[in-house]
């Protein structure tokens, strides 16, 4: 199958051909025909499977057939993404697809000046790519309205839930027309996704490629069982073996990632870092230097686990194991892009055994051991008096564990006071 068979406008297929894109990926082949028929779509696919084209091309095709420009401060299509990096990548792709047309794409994300974004929205746009928090800021300022939005896309919806954007999404939903077309894409299907789908989608068609949790076949995975205090030394030793190859190192916290980046820079590595404490300008400069090869080691939190498409990344290090098992698959998916091979190395300290077990359970496979041996973690012993009711049951006032909701100590016999001598 090629894009011509999907019924897309010739100018769109020509733009794709100029970018060297001739055959649709599985998620594109499944989702595009339904989207072009006006159906709501729920797509399940890992990052790097071509989801941007799966939702972007049908929207652009429909918008090319409409006459006139968007009204001031409106957007005909709204794409919500959980991170700035993913939002920027989506906007870049949509801009490439619409080059030479009258369709305008606007990107609005946090960490960048809001005044300039407000100016770009004044004349309206065909496609608005946004992170939920910044969109709420712009809505509160009256810089944009959504009552004429015909298309809505929620990309990486599971990560939006992980990052706590559910409240922002609930605020955005009532501002959209009921007769819009909605597409939701996610790598996993947590329970809360059902609520999100019920709120936004109407009788959706479900398409799925790649079972959730499946890691790329071309990624050589390994795990080192190592004490937390020794992780940095081992990382330096491993990175030293491939100084000319690009690597991404994932940490769990912003502070820890910044501290690790400074250590690597001090040890002579061409390194940079991106995390939530960095401004958008700093993050953009770090990514630009990494893509250009000026920086060889990028230290990042999970803001870079999705939406980072750099084919030259050869190594991914999980310096800290993620709390969410599926994020491990997203992290290591930053390597082995575009058919290349890649390596994913994980470090596991004693207090991360539960995370490792959860990751292996999600992938339905064990990660080969590179060094050390699995830590033996003792199960916590039950506390004394563990059989006593601690929560619920009594709805009266006072302590929940006291009979009938009495205050603590109520009903006890009091010892009579001794009279002073």
Image: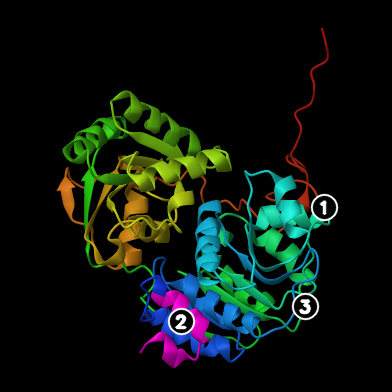
* Res 328 → quadrant: bottom left
Residue neighbourhood size for the residue with mark 2, other residues' Cα within 10 Å, grouped as few (<14), some (14–19), many (≥20):
many
Q: Give the range drawn in magenta.
A: 1-17
Residue 275 versus residue 222 in the image, above or below: above
34 vs 353, nearest the viewer: 34
Q: Which of marks 3 and 2 is in front?
A: 2
User: Which residue sits at x=60%, y=79%?
Assistant: 59
Which label's residue is closer to the chain start, 3 or 2?
A: 2
Sequence-earlier tag: 1 or 2: 2
Comparing marks 1 and 2, which lies closer to the viewer? 2
Q: In the image, which disc is placed on residue 13?
A: 2
Marks 1 and 3, the one that precedes in the sequence = 1
Quadrant in which the C terminus is drawn: top right
Q: How far apart are marks 1 and 3 (CA)?
A: 20 Å
Q: Position of residue 91 (x, y in %)?
A: 55, 62
Observer-nearest of 350 and 219: 219
Q: Is residue 188 left or right of residue 365?
A: right
Residue 160 locus on image (x, y percent):
57, 60
Q: Where is residue 264, by image quadrant?
A: top left
Mark 3 Cα-neighbour bin, 10 Å: few <14, some 14–19, many ≥20: some
Q: In which quarter of the image is the N terminus?
A: bottom left
Apparent side of residue 244 relative to residue 419 in the rendered image (left or right): left
Q: Residue 141 carries which label?
A: 1
Q: Residue 111, relative to residue 13: is it above or below?
A: above
Asked if residue 151 can be seen in this view, the reply is yes
Q: Which residue position holds label 3?
A: 177
Check contact, mark 3 vs mark 2: CB within 8 A.
Answer: no
């Amino acid at each position: 199958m090629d894009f011509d068979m999907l019924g897309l406008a010739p100018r769109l297929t020509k733009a794709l051909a100029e970018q060297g894109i001739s055959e649709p990926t599985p998620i594109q082949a499944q989702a595009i025909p339904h989207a072009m028929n006006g159906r709501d779509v729920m797509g399940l696919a890992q990052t790097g499977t071509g989801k941007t084209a799966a939702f972007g091309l049908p929207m652009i095709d429909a918008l090319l057939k409409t006459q006139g420009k968007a009204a001031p401060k409106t957007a005909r299509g709204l794409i919500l993404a959980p991170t700035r990096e993913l939002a920027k990548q989506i906007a870049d792709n949509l801009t490439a697809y619409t080059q030479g047309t009258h369709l305008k794409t606007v990107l609005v994300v946090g960490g960048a000046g809001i005044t300039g974004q407000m100016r770009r929205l004044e004349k309206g746009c065909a496609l608005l790519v946004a992170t939920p928090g910044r969109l709420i800021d712009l809505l509160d300022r009256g810089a944009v309205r959504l009552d004429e939005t015909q298309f809505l896309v929620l990309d990486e919806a599971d990560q939006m839930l992980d990052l706590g954007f559910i409240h922002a999404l609930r605020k955005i939903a009532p501002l959209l027309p009921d007769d819009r077309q909605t597409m939701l894409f996610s790598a996993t299907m947590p329970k809360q996704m059902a609520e999100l789908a019920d709120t936004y989608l109407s009788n959706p068609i479900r398409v799925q490629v790649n079972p959730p949790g499946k890691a790329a076949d071309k990624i050589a995975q390994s795990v080192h069982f190592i004490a937390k205090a020794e992780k940095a030394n081992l990382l330096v030793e491993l990175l030293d073996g491939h100084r000319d190859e690009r690597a991404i190192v994932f940490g769990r916290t912003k502070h820890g990632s910044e501290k690790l980046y400074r250590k690597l820079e001090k040890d002579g590595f061409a390194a940079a870092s991106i995390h939530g404490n960095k401004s958008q300008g700093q993050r953009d400069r770090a990514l630009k230097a990494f893509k250009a090869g000026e920086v060889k080691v990028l230290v990042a939190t999970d803001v870079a686990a999705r939406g980072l498409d750099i084919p030259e990344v050869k190594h991914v290090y999980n310096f800290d194991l993620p709390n969410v098992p599926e994020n491990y698959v997203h992290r290591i998916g930053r390597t082995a892009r575009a058919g290349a091979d890649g390596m994913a190395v994980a470090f596991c300290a004693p207090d991360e055994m539960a995370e490792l077990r959860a990751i292996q359970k999600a992938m339905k496979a064990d990660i080969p051991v590179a060094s050390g041996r699995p830590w033996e973690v003792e199960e916590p012993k039950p506390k004394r008096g563990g059989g006593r009711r601690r929560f619920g049951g009594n709805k009266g006032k006072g302590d929940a564990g006291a009979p009938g909701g009495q205050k603590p100590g109520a009903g006890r016999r009091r010892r009579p006071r001794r009279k002073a001598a």
